[in-house]
Amino acid sequence: MQFAEFAARAAEIEAEPADLAVVSLLSDLFSDAGDDLPTVARFVQGRVFPAWDSTTLDIGPRLCHEAIARAAGPNVSADDVEDRLADRGEIGAVAASYDFGGQRGLAAFGSGEQDGLTVAEVDSELRALAAASGSGSEETKLKTLYGLFNRTDPDEARFLARLVLSEMRIGVGEGTVRDAVAEAFLVAPADAAAIRDDDADAETEAAARERRNEAIAAVARALQVSNDYGMVAGLARDEGEAGLDGVRLEVGRPVQAMLAQAGTAADALGEWGTAAVETKFDGARVQVHRDADGEVSLFSRNMEDVTDALPEVVEFVAGAVDDPVILDGEVVAMDDGGEPLPFQEILRRFRRKHDVDRMREEVRVELRAFDCLHAAGDDLLADPLAARHDRLTALLGDDSPAVSDLLLSDDPDEIAAYEADALDAGHEGIMLKNPDAPYSPGDRGKNWLKRKPDVETLDLVVTGAEWGEGRRAEFLGTFLLSARVEAESGDDAFETIGKVATGITDEELAELTDLLEPEIEREAGKEVDIRPSVVFEVGYEEIQTSPTYSSGYALRFPRFVTVREDKTAETADSLDRVERLADSQ
Ligand SMILES: Nc1ncnc2c1ncn2[C@@H]1O[C@H](COP(=O)(O)OP(=O)(O)OP(=O)(O)O)[C@@H](O)[C@H]1O
């Protein structure tokens, strides 16, 4: 498929306000995509790599602006691009506003043959770009990107710019892609017609809807297990539902973590009669994969590969497990006496790429596994928690400290005593889980409840900052924070809620500046806009309603706690949560 064709269809989808019509346009695009189907299914979501793959293009706004400026000609600088961005508000519109005068024009002038970019070419160039590393890689990336922009017309440039910055924003979320895959390849045309036809009789329509829902469920299950929209789209087309049903967990390919809601023992017992009670460890979520060759890999809750940062967990698993497995757990920091250390300590180890050996001496980490998703060829997602936990104990041993103790109880007093013990031992609280529930990846449902007495903090996204003054002039100082507003389409928005400047040491300011500077989108005097990507955990006294910030709320006495390196803008706290916390104060 020509990239121009992809861009035209993406523009059409973006302009379509009705959700059902978007699914239908997307389904047509998938049907027409031919060999490029997997790539197109990723591109519409602003992805080059599957969701499970933590490879990134690693292109910050600055690099993208520079590439656009180069392609736009010698009189255009990255600053000009940023000025236009301030005017137009969106990188796609900025890219489309320049005339890159690409090769398409030349080709049309010469042979008349089409020499435009193809979807496959854009994909392979971006993949090559992602693989560039080490010294000189910035320049390589810039050249590749410049080369691509140079060959685009304005419509293509719009979507290329958005794709490289992972900001596709055409109103296509994961649910839309799921429904469109089902509609394109699994729903019979007669059923699709019956659902659309206002005059279809009720029984026919209900039966058609049921079949459509079954098809969507088959796609959803395959996506949960694989986190690969491209592969699932291809399978749905080539092998139908039978192909999707055959998708299995693959050791080495992470799945999304099951999440928890806040809740109490009374909630748990009222709902399930008996609750599975566990310690809530104050660490970082880790998914452990050990393949048939004994190779161990570790992933964060964002499915990012953190294997190299945690060698002692790798060594422990390699020594303790003989079968291929996927385990879910928490990695915790311990002091020399085996007491748990605060969460901030584990963050000094997690995702670390340098000085791992030195840090290993400073902060000791251990695994606390609490779930087993796969063991020795068996996928266990659909099994009840109690059975999965038995499997975990069988693997690691009954009294292994690496396995969470699981208490099955229907007695509120017993649960209260368990909670008191957990807190006494320095843990964060307890988890209450439905012992009969399956493992539902990515789901923050009611089957896992978390209970912690600590004052609440918020995980907010940094969307702006101000350069400091005097001896802090080289550092970003005051940080503007935003809460996430979930959109059906998947294009989250971010609404401001406050600024934080308290609780940060000079050393931290330098680190935060290094972290945030590449994400700067615009500068005006001392103020900068920052691409939503870094998450701060922030404490506060109270949440107030306030007209000062776009969320309608403000934080009283906000203070910086830590950078949530294990979170991304998409997993930061939502405005809904802020509202709930404000209501419950
Ligand atoms: N025994 C356990 N079972 C499940 N999760 C646990 C357990 N012990 C600790 N956890 C951690 O608790 C997290 C859920 O609660 P918490 O609110 O602390 O996390 P969060 O990252 O701040 O928020 P959230 O996960 O709700 O977005 C899990 O993601 C996991 O990392």
Image: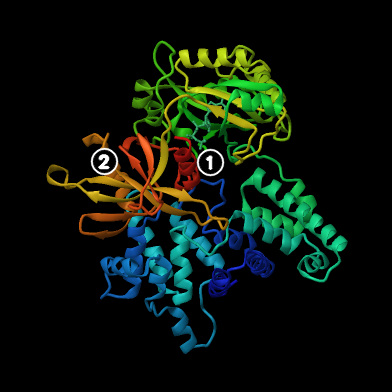
Q: Is residue 352 left or right of residue 423?
A: left
Q: Residues within 10 Å of mark 2 (few under 14, many from 20)?
A: some
Q: Is residue 56 visible?
A: yes
The residue type indicated by label 1 comes to: Met
Which of the pair 494/552 is nearer the observer?
552
The residue type indicated by label 2 comes to: Ala
x and y percent of residue 30 in the render? Answer: 66, 65
Image vertical order of residue 102 relative to residue 10, above or below: below
Mark whose residue sits in front, 1 or 2: 2
Tally the marks: 2
Q: Which residue in the structure is indicated by mark 2? A: 501
Residue ID at (61%, 25%): 432
Mark 1 → mark 2, Cα distance in angstroms: 31 Å
Which of the pair 164/147 is nearer the observer?
164
Q: Is residue 132 visible?
A: no
Query: Which quarter of the rendering shows the C terminus?
Result: top left
Question: Which mark identifies residue 379?
Answer: none
x and y percent of residue 416 in the render? Answer: 57, 15
Q: Is mark 2 within 8 Å of ligand 1?
A: no
Q: Which residue in the structure is indicated by mark 1? A: 303
Q: Is residue 145 left or right of residue 465?
A: right
Image vertical order of residue 475 relative to residue 527, above or below: above
Which of the pair 94/51 is nearer the observer?
94
Query: Which quarter of the rendering shows the N terminus?
Result: bottom right
Q: Secondary structure at mark 2?
A: loop
Residue ID at (32%, 64%): 66
x and y percent of residue 388 in the render? Answer: 69, 26
x and y percent of residue 515 in the render? Answer: 32, 45
Q: Is residue 526 left or right of residue 284?
A: left
Q: Secondary structure at mark 1?
A: loop
